[in-house]
Image (tube, rainbow, N blue to C red):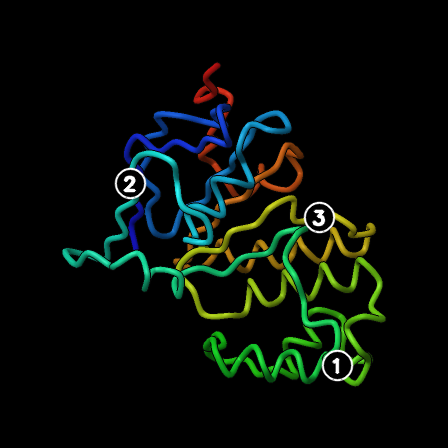
């Protein structure tokens, strides 16, 4: 799927976060959104995924010659962000079961294997509310990586990860970039995106007063 963004802008009250953003995101490529805090990195991710609406401009989702309606495009995205909510009253096994009732899992892997890949197999019956922040982050990332999608959107992906977790993330990203999926990472930490996202987009270039 290709995403074409035309004159996109987001304003809160009287302040423009970014304005006149034009870009085309292509299938199978990696993109990094960079810029100082408040430049709109997280906001742009939520707009691309359809979670928030822009103040101006439009987004065109296209697969070949077919235009995909915005209300259907959400199924092409998986997302992992620091502000993403998990269902804390579920055990890990229940959370995965619930999630994959609504979204398709990547071919060739089972929910049990997702637990193992995320280094969480010993916590199958543990409630998510009792997970450490690092365990929760690995779960969010594993859901993004192993749910079927065209685009993976990540916001500060190594937040709350220790050295082992960061090494795990980097190994998982190597798997992702060997596929035809696209990755868009919002970050100012080069180690989170440099090896995976050759296209760097500085949102400060689209900041207006």
Q: Is residue 119 above or below residue 13?
A: below
Quadrant of the rendered image containing residue 96:
bottom right
Q: Determine the secondary structure under disc 3.
A: loop
> Which circle, 1 or 2, is nearer the viewer?
2
Q: Is residue 122 above or below residue 169?
A: below
Task: Of the two numbered discs 1 and 2 on the same chain, state the one appearing first in sequence.
Answer: 2
Residue 151 position within the rendered picture, expressed as x and y whole percent measured from the top left = 43, 56
- Distance, label 1 to label 3, CA atoms, is 23 Å
Q: Nearer the viewer, residue 108 or 43?
A: 43
- Distance, label 2 to label 3, CA atoms, is 31 Å
> Which circle, 1 or 3, is nearer the viewer?
1
Residue drawn where x is 76% and y is 83% of the image: 124
Residue drawn where x is 39% and y is 62% of the image: 76
Relative placement, left or right, of 25 versus 51 is left
Question: How many badges with numbers are in the image?
Answer: 3
Q: Quadrant of the N terminus?
A: bottom left
Q: Determine the secondary structure under disc 2.
A: strand
Q: Residue furthest front?
A: 13
Instruction: Kindly identify which residue carries mark 2.
Output: 58
Instruction: Kindly identify which residue carries mark 1.
Output: 91
Q: Determine the secondary structure under disc 1.
A: loop
> Which circle, 2 or 3, is nearer the viewer?
2
Residue 181 position within the rendered picture, expressed as x and y whole percent measured from the top left = 42, 57
Q: Is residue 151 above or below residue 186?
A: below
Q: Nearer the viewer, residue 130 or 31?
A: 130
Residue 172 position within the rendered picture, expressed as x and y whole percent measured from the top left = 62, 59
Relative placement, left or right, of 120 versus 114 is right
Q: Is residue 19 above or below residue 116?
A: above
Instruction: Kindly identify which residue carries mark 3.
Output: 158
């Amino acid at each position: 799927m290709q995403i074409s963004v035309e004159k996109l802008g987001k304003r809160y009250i009287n302040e423009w976060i970014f304005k006149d953003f034009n870009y085309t995101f292509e299938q199978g490529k990696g993109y990094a959104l960079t810029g100082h805090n408040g430049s709109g990195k997280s906001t742009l991710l939520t707009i691309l995924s359809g979670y928030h609406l822009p103040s101006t401009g439009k987004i065109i989702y296209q697969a070949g010659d077919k235009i995909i309606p915005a209300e259907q495009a959400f199924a092409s995205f998986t997302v992992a962000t620091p502000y993403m909510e998990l269902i804390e009253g579920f055990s890990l096994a229940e959370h995965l079961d619930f999630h994959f009732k609504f979204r398709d899992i990547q071919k060739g892997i089972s929910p049990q294997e997702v637990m193992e890949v995320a280094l969480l197999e010993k916590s199958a019956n543990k409630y998510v509310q009792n997970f450490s922040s690092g365990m929760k982050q690995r779960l969010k990332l594993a859901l993004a990586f192993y749910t079927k999608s065209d685009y993976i959107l990540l916001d500060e992906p190594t937040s709350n990860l220790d050295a082992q977790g960061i090494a795990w993330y980097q190994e998982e990203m190597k798997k992702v970039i060997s596929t035809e999926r696209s990755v868009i990472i919002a970050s100012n930490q080069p180690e989170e995106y440099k090896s995976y996202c050759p296209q760097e987009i500085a949102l400060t270039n689209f900041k207006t007063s």
